[in-house]
């Protein structure tokens, strides 16, 4: 066991054979299997699936048998164990080796109530990674009543008034988001400020529309932070909207995959979701904005179904100008920006030389990592 790294995934990958699904679970396995040059691994991925040990409860990787593979120096195997509960992930991280339920590496902690305990534990190293991401409240642009810009503006103003609370819920793992471009990405403007809550303006907007309505907010209940965030957003909108008959109810889904499937069916009226990259790219921030707002991605990554030809051209055309694109996007309000998540990765101190990039992916594909008994 001394040469085995136990790496936790929050559930099994969507594609258990080739790991080409879009979830982080798939990406983390595929990252160690992928054969490409990234400046650190010169040629050949170091790992391949051990089909004899892999089953419905775990994925086991062994040294690659491909010619030219750069083999790990110390580790013999990587065991991906499945644990969707953030509290249990924290509990298993602190189990003493060689308890069979222990884990060595959790690339992302999701339960804020565990952060303090792990950060103060002598056997756990917590890394704070400034992720390239945006968490947002998305509105369907082509479905009543959120197809009305006045309603979207009101909802965004309510969010902006209470954003400080949403940051506090994350226990130090979030920064407030004023725009979709995340904090560490080229092009982020720290001086941008979203429209602020003005009671008189909100009153005028709500009186100008048929505001007596019940909106359904979709969210992933499998994430403790997102569950708390959804309830806070519901309560904040209901508090402002009560005199006008505007209210929100929640619809939960157990996983991100279930949530996305429902959103692609245009279920409910709005949803909490995120978009992120695991590393910087030459085309940033255009690539980031293209995923969220370009019309060609409606129904895939553009989940708000935003469609604006001018924005398309600014993002992916001869007149590229992401600042002009963002001005129009801000006016059209397809989403309310919530937070930029600061990923907290954790591993046991017996893991040595674990190199992580912004997405908490092992930069050298675990070639140099080792485990001490």
Image: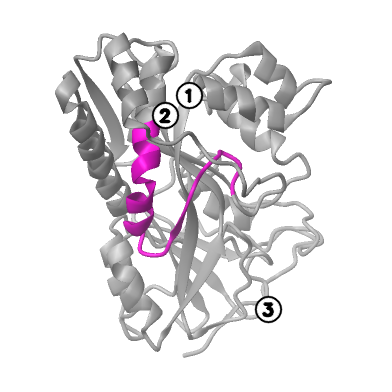
Q: Is residue 337 magenta?
A: no
Q: Which residues make up the magenta segment?
A: 157-182
| Rendered position, 112 above or below 133 | below
Residue drawn at point x = 28 percent, y = 53 percent = 224
Q: Give the class, few, some or many, for how many residues have Cα within 10 Å of label 1's Cα (few <14, many ≥20).
A: many
Residue wearing tag 3: 73
- Horizontal and vertical percent position of residue 28: 54, 54
Residue drawn at point x = 70 percent, y = 58 percent = 45
- Horizontal and vertical percent position of residue 52: 46, 59
Q: What whole-number distance in Å separates the C-alpha atoms at marks 1 and 3?
A: 49 Å
Nearer-N-terminus badge (1/2): 2
Residue wearing tag 2: 138
Hey, which quadrant is residue 85 in on the image? bottom left
Labels 1 and 2 touching (C-beta < 8 A): yes
* Viewer-side residue, 236 vs 296: 236
- Horizontal and vertical percent position of residue 186: 72, 48
Relative horizontal placement of residue 70, taking residue 110 as reference (left or right): right
Residue wearing tag 1: 334
* Viewer-side residue, 97 vs 297: 297
Hey, which quadrant is residue 68 in on the image? bottom right
Q: Give the class, few, some or many, for how many residues have Cα within 10 Å of label 3's Cα (few <14, many ≥20).
A: few
* Viewer-side residue, 370 vs 56: 370
Q: Is residue 174 magenta?
A: yes
| Rendered position, 208 above or below 11 | above
Relative horizontal placement of residue 18, taking residue 34 as reference (left or right): left
Hey, which quadrant is residue 171 in on the image? bottom left
Q: What whole-number distance in Å separates the C-alpha atoms at marks 1 and 2?
A: 6 Å
């Amino acid at each position: 066991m001394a040469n085995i790294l136990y790496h936790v995934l929050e559930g099994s990958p969507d594609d258990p054979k080739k790991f080409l699904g879009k979830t982080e679970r798939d990406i983390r396995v595929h990252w160690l299997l992928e054969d490409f040059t990234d400046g650190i691994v010169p040629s050949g991925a170091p790992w391949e699936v051990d089909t004899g040990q892999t089953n419905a409860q775990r994925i086991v990787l062994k040294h690659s048998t491909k010619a030219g593979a750069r083999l790990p120096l110390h580790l013999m195997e990587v065991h991906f164990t499945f644990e969707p509960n953030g509290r249990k992930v924290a509990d298993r991280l602190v189990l003493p080796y060689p308890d069979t339920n222990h884990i060595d590496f959790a690339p992302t902690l999701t339960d804020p109530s565990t952060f303090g305990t792990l950060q103060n534990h002598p056997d756990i190293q917590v890394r704070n990674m400034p992720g390239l991401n945006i968490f947002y409240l998305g509105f369907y642009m082509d479905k009543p009543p959120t197809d009305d810009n006045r309603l979207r503006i009101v909802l965004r103003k309510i969010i902006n008034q209470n954003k400080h609370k949403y940051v506090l819920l994350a226990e130090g793992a979030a920064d407030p988001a004023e725009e979709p471009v995340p904090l560490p990405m080229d092009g982020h403007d720290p001086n941008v400020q979203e429209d602020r809550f003005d009671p008189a303006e909100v009153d005028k907007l709500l009186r100008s529309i048929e505001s007596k309505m019940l909106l359904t907010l979709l969210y992933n209940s499998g994430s403790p932070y997102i569950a708390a965030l959804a309830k806070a957003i519901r309560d904040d909108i209901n508090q402002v909207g009560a005199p006008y008959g505007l209210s929100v109810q929640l619809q939960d889904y157990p996983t991100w995959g279930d949530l996305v499937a429902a959103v692609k069916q245009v279920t409910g009226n709005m949803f909490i979701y995120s978009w992120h990259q695991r590393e910087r790219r030459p085309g940033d921030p255009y690539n980031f904005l293209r995923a969220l707002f370009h019309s060609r991605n409606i129904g895939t990554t553009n989940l708000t179904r935003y469609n604006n030809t001018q924005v398309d051209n600014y993002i992916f055309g001869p007149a590229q100008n992401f600042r002009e694109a963002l001005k129009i996007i801000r006016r059209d309000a397809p989403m309310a920006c919530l937070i930029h998540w600061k990923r907290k990765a954790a591993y046991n101190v017996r893991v040595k030389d674990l190199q992580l990039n912004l997405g908490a992916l092992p930069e050298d594909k675990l070639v140099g990592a080792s485990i001490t008994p």
